[in-house]
Every structure is written in structure tokens, then in C-alpha cells.
Amino acid sequence: MFQIFKKNKEPSPACNSWVKFFAAIDRRQRGLADQLSRRAVNWPRRYVIIGLLIFCALYGMLSTYLVYKGVTGDSGVLKVDPIKVPANMIAPEIITGQPSMLSGAEYSRLVTIKNYLDSLRTDSTGKKLYQSFTDEYPGMVDSIDHIISMYEMNKNK
């Protein structure tokens, strides 16, 4: 049977960097643990047990406090900073509160461009030019059609 997910023979450079990073952390932890165990050899067993109990009690109290504050914390309204519109953004309906409309001249120019592109598409010699235009500006013809239809819908209202 073949395997769908095969194990890589060589690790990626990014993976190798993480392995080195975690190996360095592991070496540091082992060094600190060895140093602590060398110091604690001479401590009486009673002091070690008392130290562990104090550590566990402090850690348990801190955890309990954090859980308590998380459950019973201030559940008031969160402060949210307002979002500011960048100066270079062109959104007339947000800035002025009025929807933007095309002028009659802009509309007639869009219709002329659409008719020109349609004539290029249907003409045998213009197909190459039309294809290069659609390759250079993908979605432009659809955008022009959409703008024209939106203008006609708003014009009828």
C-alpha cells in the first residue's frame, strides 16, 4: 500500500532553526536543574518539602485569584476607539452621507467604451486587441457592465 503523507527525508531550514532553538532551551533547563540539585543535596528533606508546599500554595492562590477575577470581573461596556477613515480613501457616501452618482457625461462615456469593446470583440481584426485588453485588465468589462446597470437602476428610482 502506498503512503499518502510521506515523511520528508531532510528537514526544512525553518524546522532546523526551531529544533536548534528548543535544544538550546532544553540544555539551559537541564543545566539549571543540575545546579539546583547540587545545591539541594545538602538541604534537609524537611526544608525541601516545606519549600515545595509554599510554592504550591502560592501558585494555587494565584491561580484561584485569576479564575475568580475572570469569572466575576467587571463585565461593563468595553471601550472601543472609533475607526477613522483614511484621507486617501475615496468613499463619498461615507464622507458626505450621499450616494455617489455618475454624471450624464460619465455615463455616456462608459456606454461608448462598452460599445467600442463590444465592437472589438465581434470584429475579426479587433479580437487580438480585445484579448490583450482583457488580459491586461481582468474584470474591467464586467465592472463597466455593473456600473452601467447600477446607474440605470438608480436612474429609474
Image (tube, rainbow, N blue to C red):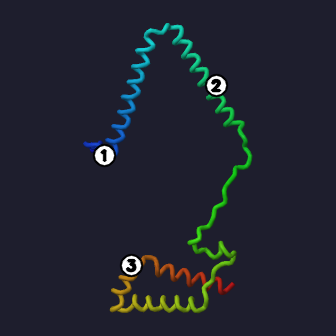
User: Going 36% across and 90% down the picture, which residue do you hit?
Assistant: 126
Residue ID for mark 1:
13
User: Which residue is the extreme one toward the left?
Assistant: 9
The residue type indicated by label 2 comes to: Met
Q: Secondary structure at mark 1?
A: helix
Amino acid type, mark 1: Pro
For the C terminus, give its image quadrant: bottom right
Amino acid carrying mark 3 in the image: Glu
- Above or below, 125 against 85 in this view is below
* Residue 146 placement, left or right of 23: right
- Judged from this view, the residue extending furthest toward the right is 76
Return the disc, 3 or 1, that comes first in the chain's sequence: 1
Q: Which residue is mark 2?
A: 61
Q: Which mark is residue 130?
A: none
- Residue 16, by quadrant, is top left
**Dot 2 or dot 3, earlier in sequence:** 2
> Residue tagged by mark 3?
136
* Dot 2 alpha-carbon crowd within 10 angstroms: few under 14, some 14 to 19, many 20 or more: few
